[in-house]
Image (cartoon, rainbow, N blue to C red):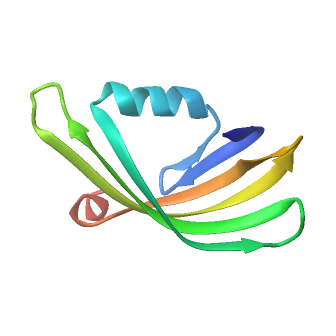
Amino acid sequence: MYTKDGVRVTNRGVLTDIAKFYEGVFQQGIDHVDIKIQSLKPVSDDVVLVQGETRATGKNDKGEPLENNFVWSLVDVREGNQLKVRMLTIMLQGAAAQGS
């Protein structure tokens, strides 16, 4: 879903090893992700700007519930016949965000 040079940008910096990041998220217990697109704006035939919210839930290894809510924006670019994420900028919302 990402381009070969795709990045994920957070308050902690720029992440380039996307597969390793998501593997870690699911190992921590996140097993359900709801994605809501709020805005989609084509810039050209090859670039689209997207904005939305995500809710990620699951249970940790102790069985305690996990829930994280994010706001995000991304830049999709055409790679071959598909639009793929070149840059995802994401921020945690709510009480957990205040401590990060």
Q: Is residue 42 left or right of residue 88?
A: right
The image quarter in which residue 53 lies: bottom left
Q: Is residue 100 left or right of residue 12?
A: left
Where, quadrant-wise, is the C terminus in this rendering? Answer: bottom left
Counting from the top left corner in percent of width and height, residue 61 is at 16, 25
Where, quadrant-wise, is the N terminus in this rendering? Answer: top right
Nearer to me, 85 or 5:
85
Residue at 48% x, 33% y: name it. 22
Tell me if residue 33 comes above or below residue 95 in the rendering. Answer: above
Residue at 65% x, 37% y: name it. 16
Residue at 25% x, 58% y: name it. 96
Counting from the top left corner in percent of width and height, residue 99 is at 26, 58
Tell me if residue 17 comes above or below residue 81 in the rendering. Answer: above
Tell me if residue 40 comes above or below residue 70 in the rendering. Answer: below
Tell me if residue 96 comes above or below residue 13 in the rendering. Answer: below
Counting from the top left corner in percent of width and height, residue 98 is at 27, 65
Residue at 55% x, 50% y: name it. 13
Q: Is residue 74 left or right of residue 60?
A: right
Nearer to me, 61 or 96:
61
Counting from the top left corner in percent of width and height, residue 48 is at 76, 65
